[in-house]
Image (cartoon, grey):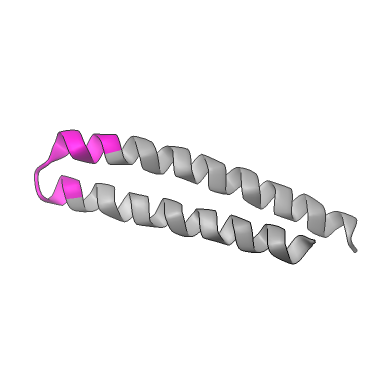
Amino acid sequence: MPKEAHNKAADRHDIAAKSHRLAADQHGKGEHAKGREESSKAQAHSKTAHEHSETAHGKSQTHK
């Protein structure tokens, strides 16, 4: 169902956003090694979120 796919994509985007904020906080505290580690995790979460968005979009296209 397209709605479920979009909800899953939105959840993944929320996870990515939280991870990006955590990375920014770490950098802001001067903890650059932790910040770089969190930035890498954020990048991975963003990629996953994008993949879920593409899947959701594809499902929406087939249900028109």
Magenta segment includes 13: no
**Is residue 24 shown left or right of residue 19?**
left
Q: Which residue is drawn at 14% across and 51% down?
A: 28
**Is residue 31 shown left or right of residue 6?**
left
Residue 13 horizontal/vertical position (percent): 50, 56
Considering every residue shown, the one lying at the far left of the view is 30
* Residue 63 picture quarter: bottom right
Q: Is the magenta stretch mostly helix, strand or loop?
A: helix
* Residue 41 picture quarter: top left
Give the residues drawn in magenta, as a range.
Answer: 26-37
Residue 30 horizontal/vertical position (percent): 9, 44
Number of labels in the image equals 0
Which quadrant, please, contains the C terminus? bottom right
Q: Which residue is drawn at 17% across and 33% down?
A: 33
Residue 21 horizontal/vertical position (percent): 30, 55
Residue 60 horizontal/vertical position (percent): 80, 59
